[in-house]
Amino acid sequence: MHAGLEKRQIQKHLLVFSAAAPVLSISTFFILNASGGSSQHRLSATGVGMLFSAGTFLYVATVHVLPEISSRGQQSSSHLHGTGTGQLEVLESLTLILGAGLPVLLALGLHDD
């Protein structure tokens, strides 16, 4: 909406975005099964795909959030949350650290069988 797109065009973009994950995950399943590789190869390919997906998600989230954080120091509107200093608050920082550290802790607790 900020880019000036029409509502109908925005809905089309959201539909494509929402359908991308399920359609591509089903496609990946069939492609990996058709490739006839070992289960270890399929597991490895799935892991690489998940890493790519997670990296893409983090990139989009970062690009979306960073301008908001940097604009906090420039704007002093009352509708903005936070201190207005352009820095992360304590709760935001802890949430970021927990979100980054929790997968590592979970991975350390898992054992390969």
Image (spheres, grey):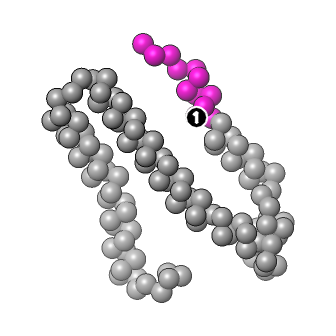
> Which residue is at 68% across, 69% downward?
68
Compared across the picture, whether 101 is left or right of 5 comes to right
Compared across the picture, whether 47 is left or right of 34 comes to right
> Which residue is at 59% across, 23% downward?
108
Which residue matches tag 1?
103
Horizontal and vertical percent position of residue 53: 43, 48
Query: Is residue 110 covered in magenta?
Result: yes
Query: Is residue 46 covered in magenta?
Result: no
Q: Which residue, as the protein is rendered here, is positioned at the far top?
A: 113
Q: Quadrant of residue 32?
A: top left
Horizontal and vertical percent position of residue 7: 40, 82
- The crowding category of the residue bearing disc 1, from other C-alpha atoms within 10 Å (few below 14, some 14 to 19, many at least 20), is few
Horizontal and vertical percent position of residue 75: 78, 79
> Which residue is at 58% across, 28% downward?
106
Work out whether 84 lies above or below 107: below
Q: Quadrant of residue 107?
A: top right
Q: Secondary structure at mark 1?
A: helix
| Amino acid type of the residue that numbered disc 1 sits on in the rendered structure | Pro
> In this picture, which residue range is highlighted in magenta?
102-113
> Which residue is at 73% across, 69% downward?
70
Compared across the picture, whether 84 is left or right of 105 comes to right
Magenta stretch: helix, strand or loop mostly: helix
> Of 90 and 44, which appears nearest the observer?
44
> Of 77 and 37, which appears nearest the observer?
37
Compared across the picture, whether 37 is left or right of 22 comes to left
Quadrant showing the C terminus: top left
> Of 18 and 72, which appears nearest the observer?
72
